[in-house]
Image: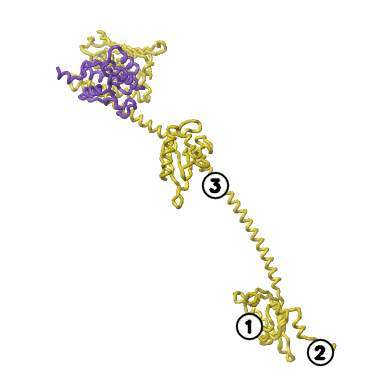
Chain colours: A purple, B yellow
Amino acid sequence: MSTVAESRPLAGRRLLVVEDEMFVAMLIEDILTDLGCEVVGPAASVAEALRLTAGSAPLDGAVLDVNLGAETVYPVADALQRAQVPYVFVTGYSAASLNEAHRGQPLIQKPFNPDSFAAELAQGLAQG
Amino acid sequence: MDDRQAASCGFQPDYQALFESAPGAYLVLRPDLTIAAVNDAYLAATLTRREDMLGRGLFEVFPDNPDDPAADGVRNLSASLERVLRYRRPDAMAVQKYDIPKPASAGGGFEERFWSPVNTPVLDEAGEVAWIIHRVEDVTGLVTRDRAAAEKDRLAIEQQAMIERLRRTNVELAASQQALKQSESRFRAAVEAVSDILWTNTPDGRMQGEQCGWCGFTGQSQESCQGYGWADAVHPDEAGPTVEAWKRAVAERRPFVFEHRVRRHDGVWRLFAIRAVPVLNADGTVEEWVGVHTDITEAREADNRRRLLLDELNHRVKNSLATVQSIAMHTLGSSPSPESFNKAFNERLLALSHNHDLLTRSQWVGASLRDMIVQELEPYQTPERRRVDLKGPDVQLGPKAALALGMALHELTTNAAKYGALSADEGLVEIVTRTETEAGAARLHLLWTERGGPPVAPPSRTGFGRRLIERGLTHELGGTAALTFEPAGLRCAIDFPLGEVAR
């Protein structure tokens, strides 16, 4: 049992996915599903993400794309922060281009390394 | 003589006294040109004394002025006397310059004199020359008067020339003033054109005097910018640090380099790069500080835009790579062989690429739905048979909707070519579009219907294409997409708001 838990550290978690690129959203969804997570979303906009964040079932964490077309995901990050839900950013941007208030938050770079994604995500959610 | 005197009136005149007092200037020479007699007028005219002259040679007493290289008195006078001795006739000389020695009491040297001499022989009974009477008239006054008149003329001419020169100088001066004015206005125009602000400060780093550039730009008056008054036109966040850094540069006499915002006269903040240097005197002391404010607002904005563009480019490239990664992983999951993976993967990448091309043609404003359909289905049209039936209005789609719908169309077409209407000769794909406006928001309905293909059975598992259409489109477009596997052919009903995708 313990070996299964170690190889799938995120199994059973309810994770919000915010990503506006269709293919990337599907990829994250697949990876998380393979890890045994329950995916909430994916949301393509701030409004939809906030609606899902305020939903009745509590979230265990969130995976947030920074750039959502014309808008940025920061309002969602702030809402999660207030709700004490850990989150990680996924982005093609460098860590330096995160806005000042969110610099230093855990960050996973696109494209993903499927082998280390789970570990990065688990570590990021433990921090964030 | 005595006889004649006696014969006339018995009165004996004193000839020597008469001679010596005669008003003209007379000198009596012996044939050997020694001086035999001289009268008072001659002595007075030549500043001489009788006792210094009698018995001495004429040219011994009156030599040429050694300081006058052009002196010809001795030569001309001796020539005249020579003629008198030879021809025994009076000889009148032309006006002769013959300077006379001044007595030591009068300072010595020579005094310039002009003479009109007449030499007259006195013959004895034998007809030989016994005496020569040398009579001179001092015409120095006449000559120098002429000279004064000539001098006056010369002065008048010179004055005229000087006036002419002055006039010409005035003209030149006016021209150079004009040139100066021109170069000054050219300088001013240049100062205005480059939009740089030039300014000066006193050696101790205070603004002083006229500062046209600064006052013109900021609208500050000359009085209000004096000293450190200029800092009032600097952005409040930067005024303090600027003055502080400026005082330090002045104290250390080092070039001042800074950046700050300055309020233009119309209230707009502009960003400036500032550079100032001390101008040194020969002794190394600071004469003044000269500074330049260069407006870098546009340059900085361009820098920021470039940085944003690079960030955006990086973001898009990374997203594209993640997209390719996603397509690869999903294609791999649904491919029974490496060959089929290769084919499906390349077709999906090419479909994505073609949709990008359509968007690039419109500079990423959007793409026409009809163009996308034609691009995707064109390869299946044959001259003999129409395989595609397109009805309804065309719609302009925003970039995101175009890419999402383009990929959905690709999946539908690929599926039709493999299993559906486009896999049979008699097959036909009908695409009907319809737009409707609901509460001010436009919606697009698209119905894809296949006919004439092999009988359709619902798939045993949910493939990538189906997921892309049903979940992806819903996610991306905020609408609905439903696949129905009817025995006559596949149907796909897509419905999404155009307003939302038009952003």
Q: Between marks 2 and 1, how big is the CA–CA gap?
A: 37 Å
- In the picture, which quadrant includes the C terminus of chain B? top left
Residue at (56%, 49%) from the top-left corner? Answer: B176
**Residue B75 x, y percent position in the rendering:** 63, 80
On residue B60, which mark appears? 1
Q: Chain of mark 2?
A: B
Q: Between marks 3 and 1, how big is the CA–CA gap?
A: 70 Å
**Residue A106 x, y percent position in the rendering:** 27, 25
Label 3 vs 1, first from the N-terminus: 1
Marks 3/1 same chain: yes
Q: Is residue B295 visible?
A: yes
Do the residues under discs 3 and 1 have CB atoms within 8 angstroms? Answer: no
Is B123 positioned to the left or the right of A77 in the image?
right
Marks 2/1 same chain: yes
- In the picture, which quadrant includes the N terminus of chain B? bottom right
Task: Name the mark nearer the viewer: 2 or 1.
Answer: 1
Crowd class of label 1 (few under 14; some 14 to 19; many from 20; radius 10 Å): few
Q: Chain of mark 1?
A: B
Q: Nearer the viewer, residue A60 or B423?
A: A60
- Residue that numbered label 2 is attached to: B4
Label 2 vs 3, first from the N-terminus: 2
Determine the residue located farthest toward the right in the rendered image. Answer: B9
Is residue B133 positioned above or below B223 on the image?
Answer: below
- Residue that numbered label 3 is attached to: B180
**What's the residue type where badge 1 is placed?**
Glu
**What's the residue type where badge 3 is placed?**
Leu
**What's the residue type where badge 2 is placed?**
Arg
Label 2 vs 1, first from the N-terminus: 2
Q: Nearer the viewer, residue B115 or B38?
A: B38
Residue at (35%, 25%) from the top-left corner? Answer: B360
Q: Nearer the viewer, residue B90 or B197?
A: B197
Q: Between marks 2 and 3, how big is the CA–CA gap?
A: 95 Å
